Structures are given as structure tokens and as C-alpha cells.
Amino acid sequence: MRFIYLVLICMMLLYSTYIVEMRVGGGENKISIVLEESTSLRNSWSLNISGAPTSPISLGDIDNDGKLEIIVGDKLSFLYAINAEDGSLLWKTNFSGKIIGAVIGDTNGDGYSEIILGCFDPLYYGYAYVYALNGERGEILWFLPLEGRMSDTLVLWDIDSDDYLEVVFSVGSRVYAVNAEDGSVLWVYNAEDSVLGSPAIGDLDSDGIPDVVFGDISFNVYALRGVDGSSLWRIKVDLEVERSVVLGDIDGDNKLEVIVPNTMFTGEEYNLYVYALNGEDGSILWKYITSYTVYCVPALGDLDGDMLLEVVFGDDTYVYAVNGDGSLLWRAKIAMTTSPTIADIDGDNRLDVVFGSGERLIGLSGFNGSIVLSVNLESEIVYSPLLCDLDADRQLEFVVACADATLRAFDVKALARRIYWEGLCGEFFDGFYRTKNARFVDSDADSLSDMSESLFATNLDDWDTDNDGMADGWEVFWGLDPLDPKDSRGDLDGDGLSNRDEYRYRSNPMSPDTDGDLFLDGIDSGFLGSPTNTFDNPFTRLLTGIIILVIIIFIRKSQLFKK
């Protein structure tokens, strides 16, 4: 009898372990990464500039030739316009002061893109300047002098719904909204303390008009109405907000949430708190805590194919991918020293996490955090890697800025066409605006960015291009064809659920038993349960109950035997 009890207990332990492992799926993945040289990239071009880059790379067709150009500033105050396909110089011009960063868009409605950039005096930090340049030749169209220090990049968007772009930025504790056409000031907001991070733009209260969101070093997060700079809400968090906030619908409620990274020196180390705030009123939804120095602005993307955005950030020891409810998807043990970019770099149509780690260009699988790319560039990577189709070959290339005053472009050997989140920016499609808002990355919320829709030939305004009941991004993630309606009737894993039903349940179409409860997904759904919930199947509950009962009987018998 004891032997039978022992066998049942062993079976129960094995069964429970199986259930837990399957439920966690991509759960906390503490990966000790051994960095090996990657062969998945090949050199495209390299360009030496006069000094180390002082601004993140911007990208746009600034001369209206149908090809992309790169904009970057260096520590000698030169601004460069570079042909993205081959690295040749289009023009360069010199400014008085450190170049912070550029945004690109058609600011006057003439069909040509202009460049707007910020500078500040490197000696006294007393004056900041905003310049608007003609994209084709780099000539100054207007400039705005301001008193105070500019710390981060500008943002370009139509924030007052007048069909013209405005530029939004911070100088000291003041946040400015300026008409991008002529440099006239639309409004100014005085924060309690210095605003170090670039603002984010998005419609938080669903009134059809964009709002402006940012934080300061006195623990405040602000949301302002874009039309006039009046306050929508303001809240206090635990720590200083030193970096940019980002916006996205991370919980599937069709409303924007605000992701806030902040830091505090405790005397021994920096702690990172990443908050998720309700965009409508600023209330705290959750807070995730780590214990190491932070370098990055978070990025957003659907890493695991569940049609919900995950939040990606890192410190000097770990990279984190956090679900929209604040739970951990995975964690990888490697330092993140630039803000991350979210894109497919290995050709499997699933989003990866790309960033600089000192001198190494690193790519982690978005699905589980395993390493998919490691390249030693032998010079520190100073800003987020930029990924885009640079040469119109319908697949992605890298551009990386390094501390040795070089820009380097690489071809991805695999057929990679998915880019979701450009680091420090969010969107890039018809302009380089730096809104840091997932809504502007993915217009139809189908988990396929507008840029990727152009590469896959899907409709960027229709979440289901082929009208088969499955979102375009979900089909691409799982290897289906977003242009073929017939694949909705297939059953990739033979579990009795069609691909369309797998999408409806958000189950894994490549796994016959998504939740690991020992029953096929088709059986789970047939018994009024869910193929994604281990314990909602009546047979699973019955089996669990029997095992628990056997354990209780065994304990009772053991106690009686001892007596």
C-alpha cells in the first residue's frame, strides 16, 4: 500500500511540475549569456565623422529623391546628412553648441521634409537653440534662442489638430510647444523642476486631440492638453523621472497607458522603478522594481504573439520583458547600455530586442530572451541601433553610431521585414517624429507596424487585410499568410482547433496543448473551458482533486501508523 501511495505522489509531483512549466511558458528566464561572434550580419558601409556622435540617429527622405537619408550630430557641433543606402555625404553644417537630436517632417505643407534640431551651449549651459533647416541643403529657415539647458530630443506632431506640425521640447523646467512652420511659441508650461526626458505625444482621454506627457526630477508625471498646454492630470511617483515616458495600450482596453521609468540613488546603488499609469487619470496600475543602474527608455512590442504589448527595458545587469499586467515574461542577464529597438533580426517573423551592451551589438529573442545576435564592434555603441529598409530591397538593415566617431551600416542576412519600435522614438514611416507612442507605430493595432505593413504588402489601415478573422501581425508571427484567407480553416498543430479559433482563444497554433493540462486545445474548448487556462478543464480539476485526496489519505495513514 505504501508503494502505491509513493507512486501516486511521484506522479502528482511530475504532473504538477509539468503544469507549472507549461503555464509559465516564457516566464522568468534567467539566462547566463556567453557572447559569441554572430555571422547573421554583413557589412554594408562605414563612415568616419569628425567627432563622437552626440545625438541619436534620425532618418527621412530630406531631399525628396525617394531615398532615405541619415541625420546625426557630433561633439564638434557638425550636423551630417548622409545617404542611407551607401553612406555617402549629402551635406554637413556647423552649429554653435552641442547638437541634441533631430526630428524630420513636412512642417510647412510643401511636400518636402524639414529638419528641426536642438542645441545647447556646451560651456555655460546658459542658452539653448532650436533650428529649422531645409532638408535638401541644410540651410536655416528659422531659429529660436531660449535661456536654459536642453537635455533630450525634440518631438514633432500636430498637437492642436490644425493640420500643421508643432515641435515640443523641454528647456530646464519649462516645456515648450512651438509652431514648426515658423518657430512661434504656441504655449509654455512651467514644471516644478527640471524636465530631463523628451515628452511623449498621444490622446490619453479619447477626445481626439493629442496630449503631451513627461516627468520631472521632483517625482512628478504630467499630462497636458496639446491644444493649449493646460493640465489634464499630474501625479507624484516614488522617484525622479529622468528619462522619457512611452505610451501604448498594454492591457488591451483600447486606451493608452503611460510607462514611466525613474531612478533614485540610495547611497549604494540606483534602483529602477518602471510604472504603468492609467492614461486617463494617471492612477498607478502597477510598478516593477529592479536594483541596478538604468540606461534606457523602455520600448514596446508584442513579443509572444498574444496581441498584447510587452514592455522592454534594462539596467547594467539585466534585460527585462514585462507583460502588460506587470508580470515578468523573461529576464536575461546582460547589461543594456542603450535604449532598445524592437525588430525581427533573424528572419523568423518574430520580434527581437536589439540594443548596445558596451561595445557589443546584442539581439535577444523576444519570445524567450535567448541570444540571437552578438557582434563586437570594438567601440562603444552610444545610441539605440536604428533598423530600417535603407536601400529599398524590402528588408531591414542596421545603422549603429559608435564612440570612435563612426557610423556603421549592416545588412541582415536573414529575410527580416518586421520592425516595431525604433529606440528612443517609437514610430518611423512617413516622418521621424519621436512621439514614443505605439498608436503611431501601428495605425490599425494589428501588431504589425506601418513600416512592416509596407514590406509585407498588407493594408496599414485594416487589421485583417485578407478578412479571414485573424490579425495581420498574429498571422505573420505564427507563420501564416496575411494575404491568404484560406489559411484560417487550417489546423497547424492538429489539435482540433482551426487557426481562426486559435486566434480567437489566443492559444498557440503550433502547440496542440497550449496550457499544458494534458488535453488538446480542441477538447479544452469543447468542454466550455479555455485552451489557455490549465485549471478550467473539468477533467483537470477532477484529476487535481483526486491527487490532493490521495495525499491527504497518505498523510492520515502515516500518522496512524506512527501511533
Image: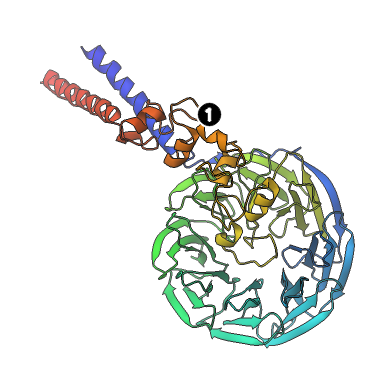
Query: Where residue 77 sits in the image (x, y, percent)?
Result: 81, 74
Residue under the point 48% across and 35% down: 508
Q: Total number of numbered labels?
A: 1
Q: Residues within 10 Å of mark 1 (few under 14, many from 20)?
A: many
Dividing the picture into quadrants, the one containing residue 189 is bottom right
Secondary structure beneath disc 1? Answer: loop
Residue under the point 45% across and 62% down: 255
Query: Where residue 489 sits in the image (x, y, percent)?
Result: 51, 32
Dividing the picture into quadrants, the one containing residue 197 is bottom right
Q: Nearer the viewer, residue 154 or 181?
A: 181
- 383 vs 323, left or right, is right
User: In the image, what residue type sits under mark 1?
Assistant: Leu
In the picture shown, does residue 110 fall above or below 559? below
| Residue 227 shows up from this direction | yes
Query: Where residue 2 sits in the image (x, y, percent)?
Result: 22, 14
Q: Nearer the viewer, residue 260 or 37?
A: 260
Q: Which residue was labeled with disc 1?
A: 492
- 404 vs 254, left or right, is right
Where does the C terminus fall, quadrant-wise?
A: top left
Where does the N terminus fall, quadrant-wise?
A: top left
Query: Where residue 419 sits in the image (x, y, percent)?
Result: 65, 51
In the picture shown, does residue 225 fall above or below 345? below
| Residue 355 shows up from this direction | no
Q: Nearer the viewer, residue 292 or 140?
A: 140
Residue under the point 42% across and 40% down: 505
Visual colour scheme: rainbow
Residue under the point 66% across and 73% down: 154
Dividing the picture into quadrants, the one containing residue 340 is bottom right
